[in-house]
Image (tube, helix red, strand yellow):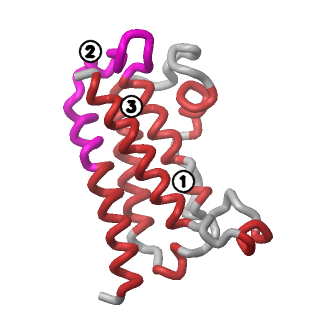
Amino acid sequence: MAQEKLLIATAIASWKQIVGRVDAAVAGFSDEQIEKQVAPGRNRVRYLIGHLTAVNDRMFPALRLGERLHPELDEAYITNPDRAQLDPVSVEDLKKAWFEVNSKLTAAFEKLTPVEWLERHASVSEEDFAKEPLRNRLAMLLSRTNHVSMHAGQAVLAK
């Protein structure tokens, strides 16, 4: 495997590992556990899952991989803090959205070439990208992998 492909495969493997851990946790959470706060006065596990799903869903247009699947999650899980809005979907539908978004993202990631990974993401202009070429698709993947990992650590506290 060429070194460039190996580097990209390593980043995608890290994404898969972190998302896979959350997949197992999400599948294992009971309805009662998913409503628990990670600590008194803090976010519920449900909010964390909704937040991660919505943020990851935003990667489709940001990485120019297609349209979002669940923009209806933004208001409750990105724009507002936990419990400021009614939950827009059932626990079952939220879990389905988590799995759908991340499985489709992962499939799309695996189709990109190393050159495509180093292209700018849609959140940066061509002019800014010319000045800062590290604002590329791969950087966004690494950032979002860390984001999932951080919130996964919080969700574990609720168990």
Image height check: is 54 above or below 137? Answer: above
Where residue 40 sits in the image (x, y, percent)?
38, 10
Image height check: is 75 above or below 84? Answer: below
Callout 1: SS: helix
Image quadrant occupied by the C terminus: top left
Callout 3: SS: helix
The answer for how far apart the CA atoms under marks 1 and 3 are is: 20 Å
Q: Earlier in the sequence, mark 3 or mark 2?
A: 2
Amino acid tagged 2 = Glu
Identify the residue at horizontal 39%, vertical 24% (top origin). Answer: 46
- Residue to which mark 2 is pinned: 32
Where residue 144 sits in the image (x, y, percent)?
47, 51
Image quadrant occupied by the N terminus: bottom left
Q: Residues within 10 Å of mark 1 (few under 14, many from 20)?
A: many
Which residue occupies the foreground of this view, 69 or 17?
A: 17
- Residue 59's mark? 1
Q: Residues within 10 Å of mark 2 (few under 14, many from 20)?
A: few
Callout 2: SS: helix
In magenta, the rendered stretch is 20-44
Which residue occupies the foreground of this view, 72 or 18?
A: 18
- Residue 42's mark? none
- Residue to which mark 3 is pinned: 93
Q: Are marks 1 and 3 in contact (CB under 8 Å)?
A: no
Residue 128: name its quadrant: bottom right
The answer for how far apart the CA atoms under marks 2 and 1 are is: 30 Å
Q: Count how many numbered circles sit on residues in the image.
A: 3
Amino acid tagged 1 = Met
Q: Residues within 10 Å of mark 3 (few under 14, many from 20)?
A: few
